[in-house]
Amino acid sequence: MPKLIRITTIPISLDKLLDRQMSFMKKYYEVVAVSSDNNYLNKVGEKEGVRTFCVEMTRKITPIKDLKALWKLYGFLKKEKPLFVHTHTPKAGTIGMIAAWLAKVPNRLHTVAGLPLLEAKGNKRKLLNLVEKITYVCSTRVYPNSMGLKEIIIKEQFCSEKKLKVIGNGSSNGINTSFFDPTLYNDEDRYKLKQELNIGNKDLVFIFVGRLVTDKGINELIEAFGIINIKFPNTKLLLVGPLESDLDPLKENTLKIIDECENVIAVGWQSDVRPYLAISDALVFPSYREGFPNVVMQAGAMGLPSIVTNINGCNEIIIEGENGNIIPVKDSDAIYRAMELYLTNKDFMFKLKKNVRNLIVSRYEQKVVWEALLEEYKSLEKKSQNV
């Protein structure tokens, strides 16, 4: 059976972003999962039923550690001789593609699920641009997970267009719509969690799910909610996700409001976001950049309309006025106006909620994405046999 090696920088990406995909692929390939943090990685391997190999990688610029990781991964690939190496996330992409190129792996595949470098400036931007180009040069195929991301890659001249392909309708893994299903939660479940979080039955709940960092638009969201909170006191903002102060800190005033405002409820990282989506009315996701955001699909599958920024991925999942609203990036006034519309126009909210789940199910059901990726693998396998 041909061998397929999947690589991410940290194992949570294998666990959450590629949930169940490797266990689907192992019916057709011998799958090996490669990442850092051996304990967590082993748990992912057990869950997916695949072999694992630990290579310690970091999400920061760490040249010495990166070289050690590259050498270790190169040795592993030389020994394993896979047909495919498929990487996700920036650091794993660079190290994985260079190692696979050195090891002469025939199919070197990299999925792009976002470009952190777009927010960088000066010499840091130049360095990140160079690293991105090296990743793409070493790969044989590059898979942007949205059409918008594909256009950005072409515009930035990171690689030739013929190397690029969007799988299916976009997304790295689609959405398990039988898992993200609002009917799994009854009124009693919702009432109990609302009581715990001090949310009243008449409160309208906006939710954000993701890392609480500047790049996700949290400063603008909190600024907008500060005004909403005064005008509409029966409104709550639920923040589900961890702070990452070392990588991308928030403004001091933002942290102060999160800490002190009783209508802002921060619950930290949660292994299961569904109960929180089940008690909410709309997602607000004002990110600066994305690949193809899972949370917008998850919220949609749970019946929530979304307010999103006009960035790739988000503006493909959300159709303006059909299952949510698209607003400008870094614009707290636009966030405020969109939230206000949801609070004052109940008919509009009802219309959005009626459409939202069906639009996700029809376009992004998980098995549709998996089958499209499998078809790509089979096509490349056939070409390899003919060489």
Image (cartoon, rainbow, N blue to C red):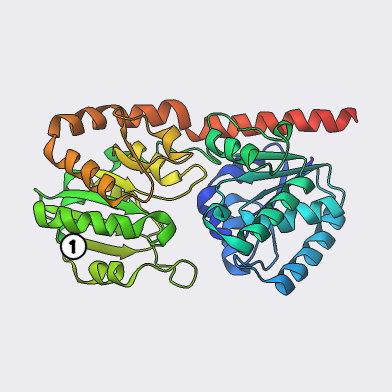
User: Is residue 342 left or right of 231 when viewed as pictured?
Assistant: right
Frontmost residue, 44 versus 155: 155
Name the residue located 27 percent from the left edge and 38 percent from the top edge. Answer: 183
User: Is residue 215 left or right of 136 when viewed as pictured?
Assistant: left
* Residue 356 image point, x, y percent: 32, 31
- Relative to 35, is 104 above or below? above
* Residue 188 image point, x, y percent: 17, 49
Query: Which residue is disc 1 drawn over?
Result: 196
* Residue 213 image point, x, y percent: 41, 62
Q: Quadrant of the N terminus?
A: top right
Does residue 34 appear in this view?
no
- Relative to 182, is 16 above or below? below
Furthest residue in direction right, as rendered: 387
Q: Quadrant of the C terminus?
A: top right
Frontmost residue, 288 versus 4: 288
User: Is residue 143 left or right of 180 when viewed as pictured?
Assistant: right
Name the residue located 28 percent from the left edge and 51 percent from the top edge. Answer: 332
**How many numbered dots are placed on residues in this image?**
1
Q: Residues within 10 Å of mark 1 (few under 14, many from 20)?
A: few
Frontmost residue, 108 versus 127: 127
Frontmost residue, 113 versus 54: 113
Q: Amino acid at mark 1?
A: Glu
* Residue 11 image point, x, y percent: 58, 60
Name which quarter of the figure residue 161 lies in. Answer: top right
Does residue 283 appear in this view?
yes
Element carrying mark 1: helix
Name the residue located 55 percent from the left edge and 55 percent from the top edge. Answer: 116
User: Is residue 285 left or right of 288 when viewed as pictured?
Assistant: left
